[in-house]
Image: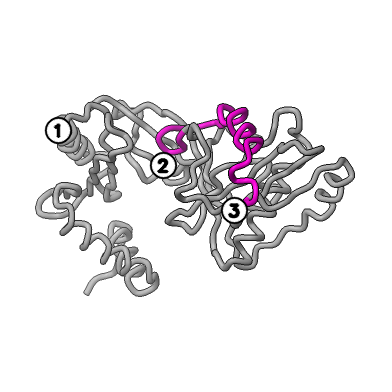
Amino acid sequence: MRPATAADAPFAALLHNGTQEPHYHRTGAQFAAAFARNPGGYVLAETGGQPGGLGTFRLPDFHPTHAWLGLHLHPDHRADGTTAALLAHLAAQARAAGRFRLWTSVREDYLPTWPDLPALGFREVHRTFGGGFHLKGWSADPARLEADLAARAYTLEPAAPYRDDPRLHALYTLTRGDKISAPPTIPPAAETLIDEDALWDAAFLARQAGEVVGLALPERSRLNAWNAVLVVHPDHRRQGIATALLARVARQLQAQGLGFLNVAGSGRDTAYLGVLRRLGANIEPDWLAWEREA
C-alpha cells in the first residue's frame, strides 16, 4: 500500500469510473466486440509494456478518398513520440488501402485532451454542431407566432396529403441549393425529395393563397429522427415560418413516442441555429473536422 499521487490520477479515474459510471462498462463491452469484429481498425501503442495510446481507423464508403482516424492518448504520453508513432502507422494503413487523405473530427471542448493537430499537419476543414430536441419533457408554445402567421393568411397543415403535389416539389427544387452543407458530415441536399426514410406522418407545410411556401420533413435515423428538410420560399423568410413548422414536427414526433429529434447542421448556418435556439433545442459545442495528406 502507498499514498496515491498526482501521477496516479489517470488510472484512478478509470477505477473510479468503473464503479460509478454505467457507460464505462458498456463502452468496454462495445470495444471488445469491435476489436473482434474489425481487428485492423484499432491499434495500441505501448511503451515499456504499458499502453500509451489507442489509434482507431476506418474506411467509410461515403468518403472514398479519406481514411478516418482517432488518436486517443494517455495524458503521460501526449508530448512524447506516441502520437507520431500512431499517426505513422495509421497513415501507412491508409496508403495501403488507396486512401491518401486522413480525416478526424473532434468536439471543440475535447481538443485540450487531443494531440496538437495543426502541429501534426492537420488543417481545419469545417465546423458542425450536434444536438437536438430531447422530446421527453420538451415543450414550446408557438401559439402567438402561429396566430401572427394566421393573421397574414398563412396556414400550417400536415404535408402527407401533398407528398406528390408538384407545388411541394417545386418549392424543394427552388430552395435545396440554399442548404449550408459541410460534407461529408452534413451532405448537400438531395436532388429530389426522397421517400425512403421520410417520416411523412410527422411532416408539415405552410401555405399562403394556395402557394406552398414552407416544408419541414423529418427522416428516420439511428437517433430516432433527423430534421432532414426545413425550407422556406425566399419571398417568405424571416417571418417565423421555419420556427413554426419545426415546432409542429417536434410536437408530432413527441406524440408518436419518439425520444429525440436530431438537428445537426453546419456551424455557418446562423439562421437555422436561430430557429433551434428559439425552440429550446440542446445545441452541443461545435465539432471540428480536420484533414491532412496520408
> Can you identify the residue that label 1 sits on?
92
Q: Amino acid at mark 3?
A: Asn
Determine whether 254 is above or below 86 in the image.
below
* Residue at figure coordinates x 27%, y 50% from the top left: 74
Q: What residue is rendered at 49% in x and 59% in y?
A: 224
Helix, strand or loop status at disc 1: helix
**Magenta region, residue range:** 160-187
The quadrant holding residue 11 is bottom left
Q: Position of residue 83 (x, y in %)?
A: 23, 39
Instruction: Judge the density around disc 1: few (<14), some (14-19), many (≥20) Cα neighbours within 10 Å.
Output: some
Please state which amino acid type lies under the numbered disc 2.
Leu
Left or right: where 203 falls relative to 241: left
Q: Is residue 243 above or below residue 252?
A: above
Magenta stretch: includes residue 171: yes
Q: Residue at x 62, y 51 (%)?
A: 160
Q: Which mark is residue 111?
A: 2
Which label's residue is closer to the chain start, 3 or 2?
2
The residue carrying pointer 3 sits among few (fewer than 14), some (14 to 19) or many (20 or more) residues within 10 Å by Cα, namely: some
Q: Residues within 10 Å of mark 2 (few under 14, many from 20)?
A: few
Of marks 1 and 2, which one's residue comes earlier in the chain? 1
Residue 166: image x %, image y %?
Answer: 62, 36
Q: CA distance from mark 3 to mark 2?
A: 21 Å
Residue occupying image coordinates x 60% and y 60%:
253
